[in-house]
Amino acid sequence: MNQHSPDKEPLSLQIPRTLKVRLYRMALKKRMNLSELVIKILLAETADIPISSGDYEAIASATKKAEKTGKRLATILNDSKRLES
C-alpha cells in the first residue's frame, strides 16, 4: 500500500487549461514532473513569507497526529478564519 508522507498535505485547486498546459510543458522542459515544478515555484514565491512559532507548533501537531493515525490531517492555524476572508 502506498502511504502518503505525514509531513505533507494535499492541495487541490482548479486552474485554466491553458495554464495547466504551460506548466506541463515547462515541467517537461526542466525534466521534472508537474508536482515537483509547482512545489519549486511555490517555494520560490513564498520564501520571504515568515512562519511564526505558533505555525510551526500547529504543523508539528498535525504531523504527529497524521503519523499516529495514518490519515491525512489538515494543519489548523489560529488565524485560518482571517485567511479565508
Image (spheres, rainbow, N blue to C red):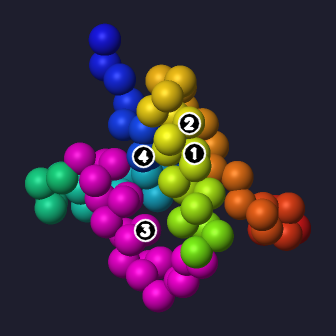
Of the numbered discs 2 and 3, the one sitting upstream in the chain is 3
> Is residue 16 something that shows in the picture?
no
At which x and y percent is residue 32?
A: 18, 53
Amino acid identity at mark 1: Ala
Magenta stretch: residue 30 in it? no
Q: Which mark is residue 65?
A: 2
C-alpha gap between disc 2 and disc 4: 10 Å
Disc 4 target residue: 7
Q: Amino acid at mark 4?
A: Asp
Q: Nearer the viewer, residue 44 or 62?
A: 62
Q: Residues within 10 Å of mark 2 (few under 14, many from 20)?
A: some
Query: Nearer the N terminus, badge 2 or badge 4?
Result: 4
Q: Main secondary structure of the magenta part?
A: helix
Give the CA separation, mark 4 to mark 3: 17 Å
Q: CA distance from mark 2 to mark 3?
A: 25 Å
Q: CA distance from mark 3 to mark 1?
A: 21 Å
Mark 2 or 4: the one toward you: 2
Residue 43 covered by magenta stretch? yes
Q: Secondary structure at mark 2?
A: helix
Q: Which residues are magenta?
A: 33-52
Residue 53 in picture, x, y percent from top left: 58, 75
Q: Earlier in the sequence, mark 4 or mark 1?
A: 4
Image quadrant in which the C terminus is located: bottom right
| Badge 1 vs badge 2, beta-carbon distance below 8 Å | yes
Tell me the kind of residue under disc 2.
Answer: Lys
Mark yes or no: residue 4 visible.
yes
Instruction: Tell me which corner region of the image, top left, top right, bottom left or bottom right, holds residue 51.
Output: bottom right
The residue that mark 1 highlights is 62
In the rendered structure, find residue 42 and report the number of the disc placed on it.
3
